[in-house]
Amino acid sequence: MMHPICRSYPLFAVIARILAPAFIAVCLMYGCAHRDAKAPKVVTIRVADWGGASADENSNRINKELLDEFHRTHPGIRIQMEHIPDAYVQKLLMMVLAHTEPDVIVLDASSAAMFINNNTLRDLTPFIESDPEMDLSVFYPNVLNIARRGKALYALPGDFTPMMMYYNKAAFRRAGVPYPREDWTWNDFLATAKQLTIRKNGRVTQYGMEVTNWMPGWITWIWQNGGDVLSPDGKKATGYLNSKASIEAVRFYTDLVTKHKVAPTVSQAQALGSENFLAGATAMTVSGHWMIPHFIATEGSIPGYKFSDVGVVGLPKGKHRVTVQYESGPAMMKGTRHPREAWEYIKFRTGPFSQRKISEQGLAISANRHIADEFGDRSPLEPVFLENIQYARGPWGAQVEMYALVEDIGREAIDEVLLGRATPEEALTRAAHRIDIQLGVQ
């Protein structure tokens, strides 16, 4: 007999069919047996995230301190962490079907719609409204609203990052090129990339820009030009992904490789190595805040590289100034039998103590504006990140549950253009049609 949730939410039926072989393993891991109806003296809250065993001693220390503090301040609640490093979303949805889901999950913005749209999460609004300690005004509004649907709020934000442009200051100095300014434009960017592309004896020894075929790396160019991948309601791609604005943006982006040759091809980038930006082989690259700890830790391991030579600036402005932001935070599963205790953990995990501890790692920015400001001087790069939060928009994956397929099709379209197999118009038109089929557009 089909599970009721499969009838109400067809995507679950698809996931169940694909992942049925893993069902038994999931049950063995998390228990399909009937739960004891007697409430224990100490309530155990199961919390799932996509982490695994970490070799980072600092990260392990911070996570232990967080759990120790929660257990100290909440003696009647025990936290059982359940790490799911592989197929996180799919395994969690299978657990929902098996009624073995955890009480709290870390919800990632890029896949939030899979859980919100399929009615697997509890609306936190009643808990927020009845808790005098809770003040949503401390959060950045555009970060908080990623998990909002109308008046309902399905997660509190933990930390996040806007996508930014990193640049190698040493490369700029060697070329005699001024560092980029926050008000720079696409034309400024292209001129800068050309000046920073160094050729010797017909061979490029330094590229101005690193181009990656990863949707977070190129969707912002479409947004900046007034285009988009999907319609405002997220239900259609034709007329949007292949609109004039989107085609212009993709042409500009791919021309960096195919026409202007200021960015390496995929094979050329691979030949340069994994640290081509820090090694000075490429002068600019787009990425998030999570790179900063790596940039700091790498100092001394690459000849000539110093962290002080890393600069960051907002993305160059097209018709609009916009970037994409990625966020994660705790959410309460609808099937929890301990909502009050789950709420206490969610509140703690997004509260000042936790946010300060998490901010020590430097991987992301606290969604709490006051905590973010406290850490605003931890590196010269931090104020630039904070300045650009106002231009950040949440990813489509927070709204459209099938968006992973959209990203796959989009990546294939960009590959076609980069490999010279199609024009941007041809590739995006085909991609839009394929996406519409996946979204069920008639």
Image (tube, rainbow, N blue to C red):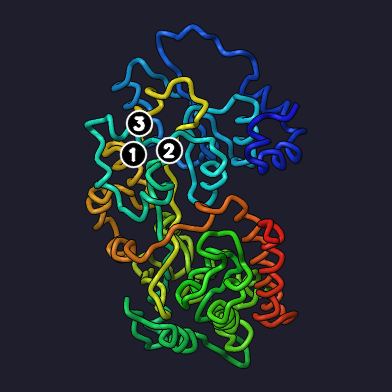
The disc at residue 330 is: 2
Could you tell me the amino acid type at mark 1?
Thr
Q: Nearer the viewer, residue 377 or 417?
A: 417
Work out how far the residue at label 1 is from the one at label 3, CA to CA, in angstroms: 15 Å
Work out how far the residue at label 3 is from the one at label 2, CA to CA, in angstroms: 18 Å
Left or right, 71 with reference to 222? left
**Residue drawn 67% across the image and 42% down it:** 10
Query: Residue 320 appears at what percent x and percent y?
Result: 40, 76
Sequence order check, earlier mark of 1 and 3 = 3
**Crowd class of label 1 (few under 14; some 14 to 19; many from 20; radius 10 Å):** many
Q: Where is mark 3, residue-wise?
A: 65
Give the number of the mark in front: 1 or 3.
1
**Crowd class of label 2 (few under 14; some 14 to 19; many from 20; radius 10 Å):** many
Instruction: Name the element at disc 3.
Output: helix
Work out how far the residue at label 2 is from the one at label 1, CA to CA, in angstroms: 8 Å
Do tag 2 and tag 1 residues touch (Cβ < 8 Å)?
yes
Sequence order check, earlier mark of 2 and 1 = 2
Q: Quadrant of the N terminus?
A: top right
